[in-house]
Amino acid sequence: MHEHGLEAILIGNEAAALQGVSVATMGFEFLFRKTPANVRKLKAIAKSLDATILKTQHPGSELFRLTRVTDILNVNFVDEVHSTSSVEELRDRTMVMHPDGYPFLVASLADIERIKAEMTKQEALRAESERALIEQIRRLLSLPMDQRTHFLRKRIGIRASCL
C-alpha cells in the first residue's frame, strides 16, 4: 500500500490483535476513501500482488475484496461513505506502526468495536431484506395462477398472458 500511495486504516480483528486483543482472524479489513485515484491505486496493488479484486453486489455496500487464490490472501477495503466513520476522523485516533520502516495506520480499539457493531447491523439489515423478498415471492407464488403478475403481464388461463 505504501508503494502505491494508498491511505487506508486497518479496522478489523487484525487491528485489535495488533493491540493485544486475543481474536481469531482470517483476513484484513481496511477503511479507505473510494475515489477514482484510490480505486486505481487498489487495482495497482492487486496487480503487483498477482491478486484479483472482487466487488460485493449487495445494494448500499461498497466492499472491495482483494483476493489471491494461491495462498488464500483476503484483504477487504470498505468505502468510508458506507460507514459512520471516515478516514479523516479515524486518522487522529490511530496508532501508527512501522513494519519495515513504512507507516501503517491501525484504528483504536474503541473505533474497531464501533465499526464492527455497525457492520454487524448492516449485515442483519441485508439479511432481513433478503428474507422479506423471499417471503414476498412465496406469497405471490401461493396466489392462484390467474392472480399472479409478472412485470406488466397478467396471466389469462393456464397458458396465456397479456399486457
Image (cartoon, grey):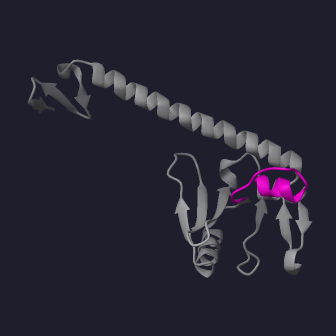
- Looking at the image, residue 114 sits to the left or right of residue 49; the answer is right
Vertical side of 4 occupied by 136: above or below: above
Of residues 81 and 76, which is closer to you in this image? Answer: 76
- Looking at the image, residue 98 sits to the left or right of residue 12; the answer is right
Q: Which residues are magenta?
A: 11-29
Q: Is residue 18 magenta?
A: yes
Question: How many tags in the picture?
Answer: 0
* Residue at point 51%, 33% (across, down): 129
* Residue at point 64%, 39% (across, down): 122
In terms of image quadrants, where is residue 105? Answer: bottom right
Query: At which x and y percent is residue 163?
Result: 16, 32
Query: At which x and y percent is residue 86?
Result: 76, 54
Query: At which x and y percent is residue 125?
Result: 59, 34
Q: Quadrant of the N terminus?
A: bottom right
Asked if residue 74 can be seen in this view, the reply is yes
Of residues 19 and 153, which is closer to you in this image? Answer: 19
* Residue at point 12%, 31% (across, down): 161
In terms of image quadrants, where is residue 30? Answer: bottom right
Vertical side of 52 occupied by 101: above or below: below
Query: At which x and y percent is residue 31?
Result: 73, 58
Asked if residue 11 can be seen in this view, the reply is no
Q: Is residue 104 magenta?
A: no
Of residues 90 and 152, which is closer to you in this image? Answer: 90
- Looking at the image, residue 159 sits to the left or right of residue 51; the answer is left
